[in-house]
């Protein structure tokens, strides 16, 4: 199973992007996307931005991921 995490682009330098996820920044490869811009939300998998998504979809996905994490901790 693959999991792609929604993240906001905060910087792009060539094919290297910097994303922010809940205050944590990471460097990713942007080579698979031609039209992504700073401020866009992208799905990130294995260090690559694979798709641009809208902010509402990103928020909904992040809420679901948080719920799953909380449920997992509650079981633990």
Image: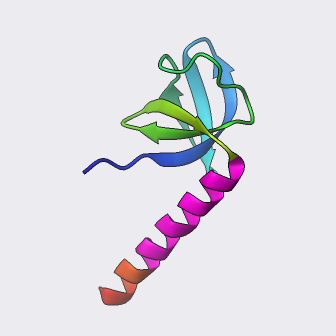
Q: Is residue 57 magenta?
A: yes
Going 55% across and 48% down the picture, which residue do you hit? 6
Q: Looking at the rendering, which quadrant does residue 20 occupy?
A: top right
Does residue 14 show up?
A: yes
Q: Position of residue 66 (x, y in %)?
A: 51, 70
Q: Position of residue 10 (x, y in %)?
A: 70, 34
- Extreme-right residue of the structure: 39
- Residue located 48% across and 49% down the image: 5
| Viewer-proximal residue among 33 and 22 | 33
For residue 5, above or below residue 63: above
Magenta extent: 55-70
Vertical arrangement, residue 47 with respect to residue 25, above or below: above
Measuring from the top left, give residue 73's x and y in whole percent.
Answer: 38, 81
Which quarter of the picture shows residue 52?
top right
Which residue is drawn at the image coordinates 75% and 36% (left, top)? Answer: 39
Tally of numbered tags: 0
Q: Is residue 22 visible?
A: no
Is the stretch drawn in magenta largely helix, strand or loop? helix
């Amino acid at each position: 199973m693959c999991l792609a995490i929604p993240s906001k682009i905060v910087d792009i330098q060539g094919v290297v992007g910097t994303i922010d996820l809940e205050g944590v920044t990471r460097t990713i490869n942007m080579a698979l996307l031609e039209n992504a811009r700073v401020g866009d939300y992208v799905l990130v998998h294995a260090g690559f931005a694979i798709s641009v998504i809208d902010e509402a979809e990103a928020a909904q996905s992040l809420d679901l991921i948080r719920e799953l994490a909380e449920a997992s901790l509650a079981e633990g």
